[in-house]
Image: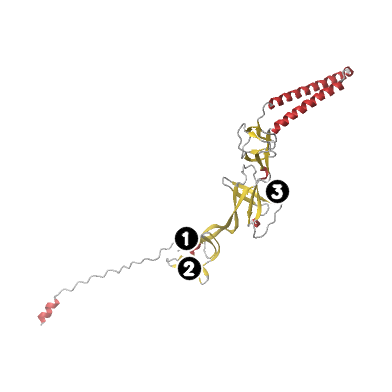
Amino acid sequence: MSAGLLSCALIPKEEVFETAPLVVEYSGPEYQMAECRRRDLLLTENISCSYVPVRRTDLYFPYGAAPFDAYLALTGENVTEGQILAELEMGTLPGEIAAAEKTLDSLMQERQQLEEMQALLTAQGREGERDFDTLFRNIDDRIYIADLRLKELEQQRADRQIAAPYDGTITYERRLMPGETVTGGDKIIIVSDSTKSIFLATTKFWNYFSEGDEVTIITKDDELAATVVSEESLGIPVTEHVENKSGTVYFALNDSSYALQDKAAGKIVLVISGSENCLAVPKNSLATINGTTVVYYLDEKGIRTYKEVETGITVGSYTEIIKGLDEGDMVITN
């Protein structure tokens, strides 16, 4: 029996291997984060407006049916008072005017010579040698007739021309070809007063504008500086403005040199309310717990938690943060 026990004692121990550590796979939520940053949050309204010259004049040829010659200024050009804008064919009229001017000039020189002769003879005590009264009546009659003839010819030329009645902009011209017959009274050109370049807006936000306010009018091609003006200052009838109903507002361009077309469209971006340079976060980072507004964030250990915040206005996709966050703080948006 002892031999048997001995043999059992000689059996080697079974080798025991160490157990490998258990690896557990874990996938937590991936958060989308956003930074609390400063930005302008402004509630705005686009106010449509259009160019409406306070004064405009339809121009035509007073002369009867006659062939058209040429335009001397075109639509969109700025013109000055008295500037010739268009003409009918003149025929022999320019030559007749030149001849009449020459005749009148010659007669004026003749009268001056007569005055000099009278002065010389008077100085010599010989003024009685000539009948100067008769000579002066004769030359003055001839001058009167020559001047009258020149004025008649100049009127005929004026009747064949269109001149600008004031400084302004041509906003319309009729399509005419040289030689085309024009009837007196037909509208040929429209001139709008460029000294009062006005945009008009009809809007329910009229009470946001006060006389003297500076605005920027955005057109298709430019941004124009303008000032709010009253109807009284423009000399036009005053219209009644009623709360919550559309009213008329006038904007005078600070620089009236722009060649604007009649009814040219523009817009004014009106700031209704808002905050400038305020802290803001995406509005989808805000949540409500028991009536309290909160934001979620990750603490130092990376664990999601939340804090209470006080909010202001929301414009677009951002909300103003009044209290509870500092600039640069990160919040969870999903």
Whole-angstrom CA distance, mark 2 to mark 3, is 60 Å
Whole-angstrom CA distance, mark 1 to mark 3, is 52 Å
Q: Which residue is mark 3?
A: 234
SS class, disc 3: helix
**Displayed quadrant of residue 7:** bottom left
Instruction: Assign the C terminus to one quadrant of the image.
Output: bottom left
Q: What is the x, y in percent for residue 158?
A: 70, 33
Q: What is the x, y in percent for residue 216?
A: 61, 50
Whole-angstrom CA distance, mark 1 to mark 2, is 14 Å
Q: Nearer the viewer, residue 18 or 163?
A: 163
Q: Which residue is mark 1?
A: 34
Answer with left or right where residue 30 lies relative to residue 170.
left
Task: Give the number of the disc on residue 306.
Answer: 2
Counting other residues with Cα less than 10 Å from the Cα at mark 2, is it few (<14), some (14-19), or many (20 or more)? some
Q: Is residue 34 above or below residue 156?
A: below
The kind of residue on which mark 2 rests is Tyr
Q: Earlier in the sequence, mark 1 or mark 2?
A: 1
Residue 128 visible in the shown view: yes
Q: Nearer the viewer, residue 14 or 160?
A: 160
Badge nearest the viewer, 1 or 3: 3
**Displayed quadrant of residue 133:** top right
Q: Is residue 54 above or below residue 98?
A: below
Q: What is the x, y in percent for residue 27?
A: 37, 65
Residue occupying the point 73% across, 31% down: 155
The kind of residue on which mark 3 rests is Leu
Q: Earlier in the sequence, mark 1 or mark 3?
A: 1
